[in-house]
Every structure is written in C-alpha cells, then in structure tokens.
C-alpha cells in the first residue's frame, strides 16, 4: 500500500504554528501600568493601614486611633482625607510598612550616614525602614499612584515617629498631584496645620530677570527660573536652577 506523499511546505506551516503557540504560552503578560489619578473626581479619601511586615511595629499600628490621627495630619493641609458629614469615600489611601533592612542610607537629608570608613564593608550603610503609600480610586482601581520613602531606622522607633513617617510619605504623594484650585504643598490660607511633615518639597517659578535684561522690551511667556525649596525641621534648603552671569 502506497503511503500518501506529505507536502513539506504544509508540514512546516503546522510546525511553525505549534512553536508560536508554545512561545505565546511562555511569554510574560504585559505589566499593568497605573492610570493617572483624576483629582477632580476625588470627593473623600479613606485612609487605611495595609500590610505591616515589621513585626515589632504591628502592635502600634493596630490601634484604632492610628488611622484617624494620620488622617487628621493630612486633612490639616486641606486634603479631603477622613470621614466628613457622612460623605461617601471615592478613593482609598493605603500605607504599608516593610521590613527593616541593613542597606544603603536613604536618599535625601538624614542625620544617619552609616559607617564613615570607606574601607569598611558596611560603608554608608544603615538600618532603613521602607514605608509606602498608595492612592487608588474605588470606582476605577486602575487609577492609582504610589510613593515610597526609606527612613533611617533607630534602635527603637516611637509611635510618634512612626506616625510622622507614614504621614510624611502620604503627604508628599498627595502634594505631587495636580489639585484644582490648590497650590502644591501649601495649606489653604484659612487653615493652620497642627502637624508639619518631616520633609516638604515646594517648587516655585520666579521671573527670569537675567533673561529679560538680555532682550529689553521683549516678553518671553512661560519662562522663569525654577526653585526647589526643601522644608525640613531645621532651616530650609533652596535649590536654584538656571545660568548665572557674573
């Protein structure tokens, strides 16, 4: 009995389809990127304490008044955090605390520089505590924004310090959003915050006087010299950007 003659092109076609199917099954899925938060849709924000990996800090954050105290710190700056007049929550603000790790010193301003000996194995390393904060829409969970900051971890972190850390991370997250009719990082003129974040970053654009002097009588719209003011518990640090002519 004669065997049917196989078409080589047809066989190759089915082999390629099978290989493509296997490759598709092994390929990782696309990473879901968060969508931009629509601040105009924010009514009230419910603050929550999420996962706390550091076991020694769980009893402190398990207290019922912790969420209310952090909400009060943030609402003092005009952010709609916490319950008010039985208004429904439109967004959630969730803080999470990681494990204390011995790693590089946190970026930014810190009184802990780690081991100062450059020959040491732990040069500029210290115990750091990572804290994150995430804002998400309840109606559309894809609308989310996230921020985390590493803090220098002391031998024992007090309750007040821990609440300050969490409030600072969430404050800087909220201050980065483009709120309608509200200046970033600035409280309303009618508000007098009782809490001050450990670090507060303010961006200011001042007129570029040097540029105007070069071209008298000619206005250049939208141009200016940017300043970043880093407010901390001591004297503020001011960073000025732009060229200087001496």
Image: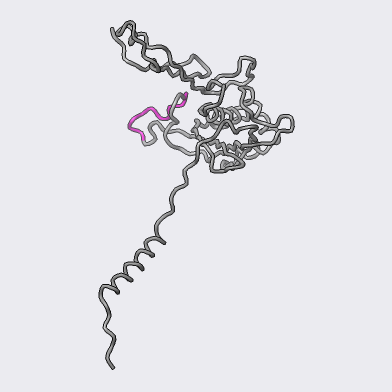
Classify residue 134 as left or right of residue 227: right
Q: Where is residue 149 drawn, in percent x and y?
A: 49, 32
- Which quadrant would the C terminus be assigned to in this image? top left
The magenta span reads 110-120
Q: Where is residue 172 drawn, in percent x and y?
A: 53, 28
The verdict on residue 154 being magenta is no
Query: In the rendered image of this protein, does residue 101 appear above or below residue 161?
Result: below
The image quarter containing residue 224 is: top left
Q: Nearer the viewer, residue 53 or 196?
A: 196
Which residue is most to the right? 86
Classify residue 120 as left or right of residue 64: left
Query: In the rendered image of this protein, does residue 208 appear above or below residue 141?
Result: above
Query: In the rendered image of this protein, does residue 216 appear above or below residue 165?
Result: above
Helix, strand or loop for the magenta stretch, by majority: loop
Q: Where is residue 22 drawn, in percent x and y?
A: 38, 64
Query: In the rendered image of this protein, does residue 167 appear above or below residue 6?
Result: above
Q: Can residue 131 be seen in this view?
A: no
Residue plotted at (43% across, 16% down):
205
């Amino acid at each position: 009995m004669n065997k049917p003659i196989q078409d080589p092109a047809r066989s190759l076609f089915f082999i390629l389809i099978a290989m493509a199917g296997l490759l598709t099954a092994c390929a990782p899925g696309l990473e879901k990127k968060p969508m931009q938060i629509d601040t105009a849709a924010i009514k009230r924000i419910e603050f929550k304490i999420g996962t706390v990996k550091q076991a020694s800090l769980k009893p402190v954050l398990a207290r019922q008044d912790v969420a209310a105290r952090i909400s009060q710190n943030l609402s003092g700056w005009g952010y709609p955090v916490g319950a008010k007049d039985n208004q429904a929550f439109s967004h959630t603000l969730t803080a999470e605390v990681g494990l204390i790790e011995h790693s590089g010193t946190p970026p930014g301003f810190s009184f802990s520089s780690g081991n100062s000996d450059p020959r040491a194995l732990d040069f500029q390393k210290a115990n750091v505590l990572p804290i994150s904060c995430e804002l998400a829409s309840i109606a559309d969970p894809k609308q989310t924004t996230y921020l985390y900051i590493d803090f220098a971890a002391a031998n024992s972190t007090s309750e007040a310090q821990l609440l300050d850390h969490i409030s600072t991370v969430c404050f800087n997250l909220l201050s980065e959003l483009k709120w309608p009719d509200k200046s970033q990082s600035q409280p309303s003129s009618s508000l007098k915050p009782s809490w001050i974040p450990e670090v507060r970053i303010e961006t200011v654009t001042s007129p570029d006087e040097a540029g105007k002097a070069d071209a008298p009588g000619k206005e250049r719209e939208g141009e200016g010299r940017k300043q970043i003011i880093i407010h901390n518990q001591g004297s503020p640090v001011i960073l000025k950007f732009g060229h200087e002519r001496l």
